[in-house]
Amino acid sequence: MDNSSASVSPKRILLVDDDDRLLRLWSRVLQKEGFETVTATNGSNATEKIKSSQFGVIFSDLNMPEMNGADLIDYCKRKNIPSCINIFTGAACLEGAVQCIKKGACDYVAKPFSPHELAAMAYRCLQHHFQGQELMRLQKNVHDLEELGHLKSELVSNLSHELRTPLFSLGASLELLFHRLPDKEDNHSQKLKKIILSNHQRINQLVNNFLDFSKIEEGVMVPKFQQVDIIPLVQGIMRDLSPLMMKNSLEWNIEVKPDPENPIEANLDPDQITQVLVNLLGNAIKFTPPGQKIGLTVSDEGSNILMDIWDKGRGIPPEHLNRVFDRFFQLDTSSTREYGGVGIGLPIVRSIIERHGGDVWFESSLGIGSDCFIRLPKTHHHLGERTN
């Protein structure tokens, strides 16, 4: 019989000893404390009791005829009996009691002992039982959460991959279609064309973000480090984003400190750092009103590089500054629906920077603007793949 899943009453105690007088005495002591007791005169008799009932605690003498306390422990282990087993022993048999502890007994006590000691041991066993139950509950919760997280990541990854192919096909078809349209289009047609392309680009970006997010969740988005001059990298990003900045009537600039003529080299993944800066600058562009300023300041700090992506937009409420990098957190549902996004861009940013051994944080004032600071070490010490 396997009792591992059977219902166990933690206050039901089995007392095992070949001395009937002691069994009666111990039963009275424990019953006064509110425990239910059953007695057995040897190990063999105890196994019969265990087959017919479940016990939270078993108190057993070590030296008994037919089956001793150590044999009883072995039996309970083979049958997966979830009882807290305690051994009684004489002072001359402490070595045997220690061996029982190694076999799986919870505790032992040397004879003779007082009624108070017996009751105290019973309560310790009761506490041990509840702690064990709580531990099993927490372990199950952790396992369930891990399984749920794995299923979620797998679902996101599968959906993203399934969407990527038709999106690519749709984009190619749209380009071909628009290429065949007359050069001179009316304003309404041009407007529709821009809406279609904009929304296709938006959906494509969301799918890519979900794929990256899934890779981060599974720990497979590993940087490919190489030696890079950061100045041409950021200049290229700003140049690529300049049409969008001009479209939004934004003033922008790049500043390099202390000397713009000197290269600032670091060991990093250029693609991932580009993704970070495009994300942060894209947010600055989206949330900065027309006519205001955004920019990027790069500072050489010796062993580190400090980048400041700043804007003169609406700012971030102080109570939200510590949450902006949380997964799926959005500052304002209405505004983010207007501008797009589901709250995974900044978590991706943080993960990339942390994998580079760096830090990223926001400083902001409402109505004045925000600064997103990135500090990167010039040499990496974190997870990554080196390329030369």
Image (spheres, rainbow, N blue to C red):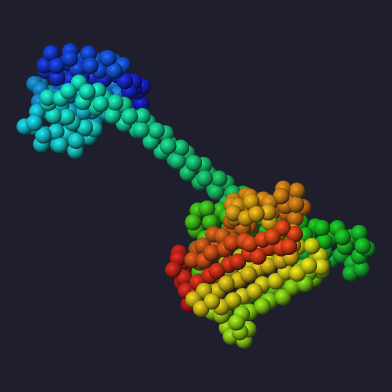
Q: Nearer the viewer, residue 3 or 233?
A: 233
Q: Quadrant of the N terminus?
A: top left
Report x, y in % for residue 44: 16, 19
Between 136 and 322, the one nearer to me in the picture: 322
At x 79%, y 62%, the residue is 289
The outermost residue toward the left is: 92
Image-based side of 46 in relation to 381, left or right = left
Relative to 55, 262 lies left or right: right
Where is 387 relative to 39, above or below? below
Total residue callouts: 0
Residue 163 visible within the image: no
User: Which residue appears at 56% of the width and 78% of the height?
Assistant: 300
Q: Nearer the viewer, residue 298 or 145?
A: 298
In this view, 303 is above or below 316:
below
Q: Is residue 314 visible?
A: yes
From this viewpoint, which residue is outermost toward the bottom?
261
- Residue at (55% x, 45% y) in the render: 152
What x and y, as percent, mark residue 127?
33, 29
Residue 295, by quadrant, is: bottom right
